[in-house]
Image (cartoon, rainbow, N blue to C red):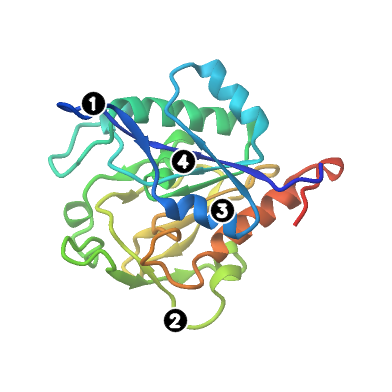
Amino acid sequence: MQNKPLIGINADYRAAKGDSPAFTCLPAGYFDCVSHVGGIPVVIPPLANEDDIHQILETLDGVILVGGADLNPRNDGFMLHPAMRLMDERREAFDRQLMRGIAQRRTPVLGIGAGLQLLNVTLGGNLYFHIPEDLPQAIPHRDAHDTSHRHSLDITPGSLMDRVYGDGEIRVNSRHHMAIDAVADGFEVTARCPDGVIEAIESRMPGWFALGTQFHPESAAASALDIRIFEEFVDGIRESAPAEMRLVA
């Protein structure tokens, strides 16, 4: 197959309110980064039909699960925390169906922010619901007055994150109050904040190229190196495709 890889991106959703109709939306950084590294972004609205979702997945070479508001912990058997600001129910129901389809098919996937958290809980991991309470020794991971708030990273040698950042000081954006607690089976932590908060995981399961970052490499506040995460993702899709289906660079 001599084509650029098709990369699906789940869209956010805003319910109708007053005179404003319901609509889907997506920060431009996600699809701009995919285009910049040689992929073709395909925006997926929050569909309800599971068969439709599987049909879409059949056409895609990979999926990016984007960030957003908080996942509802009641869907995983936990209580709601008062600090949570939940994503719309329609989007969450769709995202969970989409992620289950991705896992069943072993579709290459990159989860970012809430997308990382969804990847982890779908595969059996769990989350801290509010870092200031669950990890009181942690540094601040969100600053309401500074959207460019950053912290450093400790990287696992030999990981994809290591290939992205190499040697030298690494600083990434930070704007979250939830984080991974127990890591899903088959995944390895490949980046942490120096306070121990997990910032990246990668699959170690044969035949499944999957990874996630808690920070946002698509953000306008991202560093110049961060886009290499998208490059590695697209390269990994090409390398994981069957020989007769190789995608062009």
Q: Nearer the viewer, mark 3 or mark 1?
A: 1
What secondary structure is marked by label 4? Answer: helix
Q: Which mark is residue 119?
A: 4
176 is higher (above) or lower (below) than 81: below
In the image, which is nearer the foreground, mark 4 or mark 3?
3
Relative to the observer, which residue lies in front, 182 or 82? 82
View extreme (right): residue: 244
User: Which residue does the numbered mark 3 point to in the structure image?
Assistant: 34
Name the spot of residue 171 as percent of width and height, x first: 39, 74
Query: Which amino acid, mark 1?
Result: Ala
- Residue beneath disc 1: 16
Determine contact: label 4, label 3, CB under 8 Å: no
- Would residue 241 appear left or right of 103 to someone viewing this image? right
- Residue placed at 51% from the left, 18% from the top? 50
Q: CA distance from mark 4 to mark 1?
A: 28 Å
Judge whether residue 157 can be spotted in this image: no
Residue 71 has which mark?
none
Q: Quadrant of the C terminus?
A: bottom right
Circle 1 or circle 2, nearest the eye: 1
The residue depicted at 27 percent of the width and 68 percent of the height is 149
Name the secondary structure under disc 2.
Answer: loop
Disc 1 crowd rating (10 Å Cα; few below 14, some 14-19, many 20+) is few
Badge 2 amino acid: Glu
Residue 37 in percent (x, y) is at 61, 59
Q: Earlier in the sequence, mark 4 or mark 3?
A: 3
Examine the rendered structure and indicate whether residue 224 appears above or below residue 185.
Answer: below
Which residue is found at the position 47% from the left and 47% from the top? 111
Seen in the image, is 162 located left or right of residue 216? Answer: right
Q: Quadrant of residue 36?
A: bottom right
**Between marks 2 and 3, how big is the CA–CA gap?**
25 Å
